[in-house]
Image (cartoon, grey):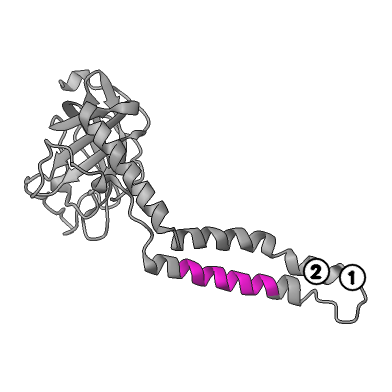
Amino acid sequence: MPASARPDALPPADQRAVLRFVGPDGDPGELPRTPEPFLVPAASGRKLAGQALLLLVVSVAAVWLVTVRAWDDEAFFPWFWNPLWTVFPWLFLAPAWWGWWRAVRPTARMRASEEAAHYARWSRHLQVAVAGEAVVLDVAHREGDDGRVSACTVGVEVGPLTIVPATVLGADGLSPAELPRVGDRLAAWRLPGERTVVQARRSTAPPPAPDARGGHRGRRRMVCGDGPRWRPAATTIG
């Protein structure tokens, strides 16, 4: 797309669009045969244990402050006083514990059902996916202290549409030189439900030279190319 034809402003991030970076062993010109690369992984055991510890601390503190401190040993208040303050904190604690339990112990039948639904839906999408081409309009990214990409947003043109994928998979840990450049042509597919999948191969361009202070340019925020600027969307790593 000529530079003069670029829009002055890009649309908001599209929640139905995904940009996926493909490793050296993959082919960005082919969609995965299974939906696994696009599925959000389940919460890890360490994360669930941390949530349980936090809930335990909050529960103990709530019971101590609300139930124990308000307990009437001398029958000064009406009969419903102690039952009221015994039940009250659990009106808030019980839903929290139930949500944690559902995350920890999904039944095998539920897991199998959800997995089968994902695979069946993806199989249908593969049969009707319309292959095309995405032209990169602009790339914005943020870098961590190590100079690697911590988040990025890419605006592309797919046919008559200008799209900013809200979900970016596989970008965490890339070097800035591995991101697409303005004008690059990427593989794209249109799926049912106005969904879009764009896939890019990691670039082999040389890394940018450090500045005079020995650091990386744009450590906090860097925009590649001369296209329009916008606020990067949060990156989702698959």
Q: Dot 2: within a 10 Å radius of its alpha carbon, few (fewer than 14), some, or many (20 or more) residues?
A: few
Task: Give the x, y percent position of residue 49.
Answer: 44, 70
Residue for badge 2: 83
Numbered disc 1: secondary structure: loop
> In which quadrant will I find the N terminus?
top left
Task: Give the x, y percent position of residue 76.
Answer: 93, 76
Q: How would you classify the magenta stretch by its main secondary structure? A: helix
Q: Are marks 2 and 1 in contact (CB under 8 Å)?
A: yes
112 vs 160, left or right, is: right
Callout 1 amino acid: Trp
Name above or below for residue 136 compared with residue 153.
Answer: above
18 vs 86, left or right, is: left
Q: Residue at x 92, y 69 (%)?
A: 78
**Residue 136 in sight in this render:** no
Please check the rendered image and state whether residue 53 is part of the magenta-colored stretch, yes or no: yes
Callout 2 amino acid: Pro
Q: Count the marks.
A: 2
Q: Going by the picture, which residue comes out furthest to the front?
A: 109
Residue for badge 1: 79
**Residue 162 in sight in this render:** yes
Q: Residue at x 19, y 19 (%)?
A: 4
Task: Give the x, y percent position of residue 230.
Answer: 33, 35
The quarter of the picture where residue 179 lies is top left
- State the separation of the CA atoms marked 2 and 1: 8 Å
40 vs 78, left or right, is: left
Please check the rendered image and state whether residue 226 is part of the magenta-colored stretch, yes or no: no
Q: Which residues are magenta?
A: 50-63
Q: Residue at x 10, y 41 (%)?
A: 27
